Amino acid sequence: MAELASMIPLAGGQYNWVALLAPSSSTKFLSYLTGWITMISWQACLAGAAFLGGTMIQGLLVLNNESYVPERWHGTLLFYAIILFSLIINTYLARLLPKIEAVVLIIHVVGFVCILIPLVYLAPHAEEIEDASTVIPRSMLASVGLNGSLGFAIVVATLFCLGDVQAALESPTGFPFIQVFINATRSNAGATAMTSVIIVALTFAAVGSLATASRMMWAFAREQGLPGSSVLARVESRTLLPLYAIGLSTIISLALALINIGSTKAFNALTSLVIASFYSSFSLAAAVLLYRKLSRKTPELVYGPFNMGRAGIPVIVLSIIYSVIGIFFSFWPPTAVVDAVTMNWVVVVFGGALLFSLLFWVVHGRKVYTGPRWETSPDGSVMEGEARKM
């Protein structure tokens, strides 16, 4: 992905990459399909971050107030609070978003230390970026390195301090890791403080997800890939923000939250779309890049500043295999005996979303979808006009 971002640092991400690298006979359709899948993934990511943050707050209420009886609609209201907070940051405070994200990075790293040390020590020992072609790949690799290292350390620490697995799974808070924190600190206050760090991180993850989801929607609407594209592609003249895309992303999340009132399992199916849709879009982008690397009938690729060289093909093959495995198990039911309750409905939701996108393509999309309208040259400059094949 870093190599692709270095070559093609456009706002649409995967669907722009597919459009510029796919065979000419299928470039429009494959980029359109990738655009829909990527947009679905970011909308699900936004809803998932807000849902987890809201229900974790409920878990802390259960932990600290014995008389509190959790209801699903409580979680939905807390979900709404996080989404509205994200909306305010992305609109009224949008100019401060880069500074806020820098502060969140510090909180992320400091929060890791604040969780890891008490957990181990106290537990019983059991396109809006300058020089995008360079900055984006470096950011991707730094993010993977930082979060991968921190995540691995947390996993090891949690397993080391897990204690009674069944007790953690049956935690009244609804989150086994909160029970692990309680066991480690032997204090509700300590567990609350540690969980609060995660809630803050999830809240700002929702802020970032709304920024990305709305800009992804705006970019795709700019290429006429969505119903109502002429409206969604507008940028407000005073703030230079895609307010219509931000507003629709917010409305989608608020509507999805209503599902939680009827069934938490059904809502979990929607948020699980993140895995299936992200991996699907990445697989398509990786597949067309592999095709271009192996094909002798296409023009030679123009690489950006970041180039994996000979390691590129093996890395791409391994990434596709990994993604296919992830997609397969994202559809897998959690129990051996499957009924309407234990069914993993992700495959139905994902299939339904794809079916709608295909129907829109047949009825209208294929007539108006343009594909990427912007192309970056190797020196990072931006040229207007429909994107040309690389």
Image (cartoon, rainbow, N blue to C red):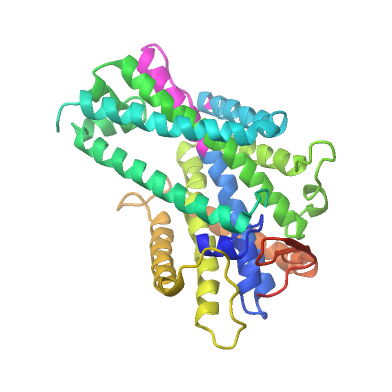
Query: For residue 240, which quarter of the picture?
Result: top right
| Residue that sits furthest to the bottom in the current view | 297
| Residue that sits furthest to the right in the current view | 237
Q: Is residue 151 above or below residue 75?
A: below
In-front residue for pair 116/245: 116
| Residue that sits furthest to the left in the current view | 125
Q: Which quarter of the image is occupied by the C terminus?
A: bottom right
Q: Is residue 368 above or below residue 44?
A: below
- Residue 191 percent coordinates (x, y): 33, 21
Residue ID at (37%, 53%): 333
- Residue 378 percent coordinates (x, y): 65, 67
Residue 86 seen: yes
Residue 342 seen: no
Residue ID at (40%, 29%): 111
Residue ID at (39%, 72%): 314
In-front residue for pair 208/273: 208
**Does residue 59 belong to the magenta stretch?**
yes
Q: Is residue 350 above or below residue 200?
A: below
- Residue 138 percent coordinates (x, y): 51, 53
Residue ID at (57%, 62%): 6
Q: Which residues are magenta?
A: 49-73
Q: Relative to 66, is 285 on the left or the right?
A: right
